[in-house]
Amino acid sequence: MRVVGLRLEPGQSVPEHRNAIPVALIVTGGSLHFDDGATSGELGPGGMLLINPGERHTYRADVATSAYLVFAGLPGVRSRTWSLRRKT
């Protein structure tokens, strides 16, 4: 498992990408807009987005936003998908 801090300034975004392993994104401050092509929404402090391996996704901030990314596994190692889509 690896935990990485993320800070986005107002108007900053992360381009669409995919991850090789499951990731949980937990917002700790501000507001984060997300889109995975099928679902889009907004998460505030305490909100969590669960991203399965291979899923395309992007996110952006309209206000200063902080979050933690929790990478749950190792690339190349078979992992199970998350059982929840998102929790707010």
Image (cartoon, rainbow, N blue to C red):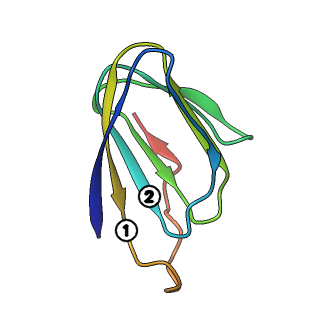
Which residue sits at x=47%, y=14%? Answer: 62
Instruction: Judge whether 51 appears above or below 31 on screen.
Output: below
Q: Amino acid at mark 1?
A: Ala
Q: Position of residue 65 (x, y in %)?
A: 34, 24
SS state under label 2: strand
Q: Are marks 1 and 2 in contact (CB under 8 Å)?
A: yes
Please indicate whether residue 34 sits to the left or right of residue 49 in the image: right
SS state under label 1: loop
Q: CA distance from mark 1 to mark 2?
A: 6 Å
Q: Read off the residue under disc 1.
A: 72
* N-terminal-most mark, 1 or 2: 2
Q: Amino acid at mark 2?
A: Val
Which one is in front, 16 or 30?
A: 16
Q: Position of residue 28 (x, y in %)?
A: 25, 31
Q: Quadrant of residue 67?
A: top left
Please indicate whether residue 77 sits to the left or right of residue 72 in the image: right
Q: Position of residue 55 (x, y in %)?
A: 65, 57
Which mark, residue 23? 2
Which residue sits at x=39%, y=33%? Answer: 88
